[in-house]
């Protein structure tokens, strides 16, 4: 399990492509909104595009609520197309 202040971020599909990796560990304490800012700072405009329409899996629940606190592990999910 991650230490306090250490966040495991897992990326899927377009989010992984934007990050250039499937997973990374970052020093972080805060909300979804501040995590988005950090991820854009780390990975640039392509990550910003993914985050505009994507969502996060936090504690097993998919959310787009920017006010939620984030700790431990979060999954970055790009928008998925239906079919």
Image: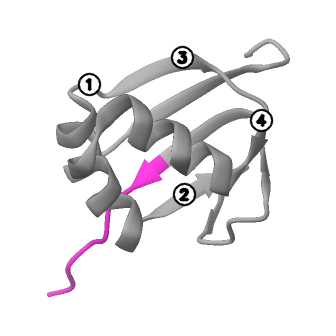
Q: CA distance from mark 3 to mark 4?
A: 12 Å
Disc marking residue 74: none
Q: Residues within 10 Å of mark 3 (few under 14, many from 20)?
A: few
The residue positioned 20% from the left and 79% from the top of the image is 81
Answer left or right for 68 relative to 53. Answer: right
- Tell me which secondary structure the magenta stretch mostly adopts: loop
- Spatial CA distance of label 1 from label 4 is 20 Å
Instruction: Tell me which segment is drawn in magenta.
Output: 76-83
Q: Quadrant of residue 8?
A: top right
Q: Is residue 13 visible?
A: no
Is 13 positioned to the left or the right of 70 in the image?
A: left
Label 1, secondary structure: give it.
loop
Q: Residue at x 28, y 33 (%)?
A: 19
- Vertically, is 6 above or below 20? above
| First in sequence: mark 2 vs mark 3 | 3
**Quadrant placement of the C terminus:** bottom left
Q: Which residue is mark 3?
A: 25
> Mark 4 or mark 3, which is nearer the start of the sequence?
3
Distance from Cα at disc 2 to Cα at disc 4: 12 Å
In screen coordinates, is 3 left or right of 6?
A: right
Q: Earlier in the sequence, mark 1 or mark 4?
A: 1
The mark nearer the N terminus, 2 or 4, is 2
Q: Would you name the residue on which mark 4 appears?
A: 71
Residue under numbered circle 1: 21
Q: What distance separates the C-alpha of mark 1 from that of mark 2? A: 17 Å
- Residue occupied by mark 2: 56
């Amino acid at each position: 399990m991650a230490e306090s202040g250490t966040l495991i971020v897992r990326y899927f599909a377009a989010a992984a492509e934007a990050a250039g990796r499937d997973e990374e560990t970052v020093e972080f304490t805060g909300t979804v909104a501040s995590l988005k800012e950090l991820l854009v700072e780390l990975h640039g405009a392509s990550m910003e595009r993914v985050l505009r329409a994507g969502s996060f899996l936090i504690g097993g629940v998919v959310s787009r609520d920017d006010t939620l606190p984030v700790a431990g592990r979060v999954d970055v999910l790009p928008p998925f197309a239906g079919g």
